Amino acid sequence: MGRFIEGCDRHQKLLLPDCVDDYVGEDSPVRVIDVFIDELNLMALGFAGSASTGRPGYHPAMLLKLYLYGYLNRVQSSRRLEREAGRNVEVMWLTGKLAPDFKTIADFRRDNGEAIRAACRQFVLLCRRLGLIASGTVAVDGSRMKAVNTRDKNYTPGAIRRRMEQVDASIERYLSKLDTADRQEDEVAEMRVTRITERIDALRRQMRELHAME
């Protein structure tokens, strides 16, 4: 056959390993998440500090970055967040290649629910003010109408209150979906592992049969 561009050998040893930062674009939203949370006063928001005894736990900032990533990308279960932490390069960059298990992620949400809501609320409002989150598109006809102040620059007390209520409702829906998904996935996790293993075995058998037929 003709010549093709070839990928690298998966088992090739690298003398100078790639830097994780090389895989994350300069305009990636995870960079905004990283800076925002690093500038937060987590204790003032109500996040619990580290335990004085026992094995050290994960830093709240790292887990909060993982949650905020999930909130923006609609990753709606602790098990899915766990998987993203182990395979998504942007999440690896964001968490320093730490991959907490789903129970740790769920416990963090349970113990810091109000603080997570407060942090997400601040982040969304800040991004809207900076123009990092686009509003929905509204179409109108060609009629002439009096110009008014754009909604995104209208900071009356009523507008701010309504906007915060919308943000709070969105955050609450996300956390509720996480709780529901976690309960459902706990029940089917073991079944899923068994099913995937069976499918892999069946696929291998079919491939051997196809090769034999060929």
Image (tube, helix red, strand yellow):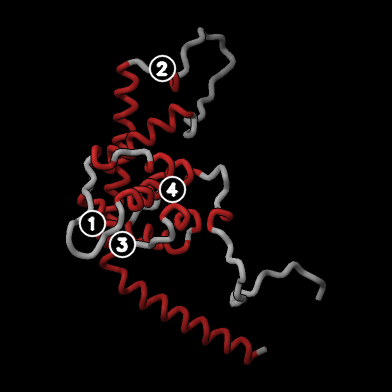
The residue identified by callout 1 is 107
Query: CA gap, disc 2 to disc 1?
Result: 39 Å
Q: Are marks 3 and 4 in contact (CB under 8 Å)?
A: no
CA gap, disc 3 to disc 1?
9 Å
| Badge 4 vs badge 2, beta-carbon distance below 8 Å | no
Camera-nearest label, 3 or 4: 3
Disc number for residue 154: 2
N-term mark: 3 or 4: 4
Kindly identify the residue that appears in the image at 30 percent across and 63 percent down: 185
Q: Label 4, on which residue?
A: 73
Q: Residue at x 31, y 29 (%)?
A: 164
The amino acid beneath tag 3 is Phe
Q: Earlier in the sequence, mark 3 or mark 1?
A: 3
Q: Secondary structure at mark 4?
A: helix
The residue under label 3 is: 102
Q: Which element type, helix, strand or loop, lies under badge 2?
A: loop
Asked whether residue 84 appears in the rendered view, the answer is no
Sequence-first disc among 2 and 3:
3
Q: Earlier in the sequence, mark 1 or mark 4?
A: 4
Amino acid under label 2? Asn
- Vertical comparison of 202 with 55: above or below: below
Amino acid under disc 4:
Asn
Please tell me whether mark 3 sits on a helix, a strand or a loop.
helix
2 or 1: tag closer to the N-terminus: 1
Q: CA distance from mark 2 to mark 3?
A: 41 Å
Q: What's the CA distance linking mark 1 and mark 4?
A: 21 Å
Residue extending furthest toward the left: 53
The relative height of residue 35 versus residue 90 in the rendered view (above or below) is above
Residue at point 43%, 57% (across, down): 96
Rendered location of residue 43, percent (x, y) = 24, 41
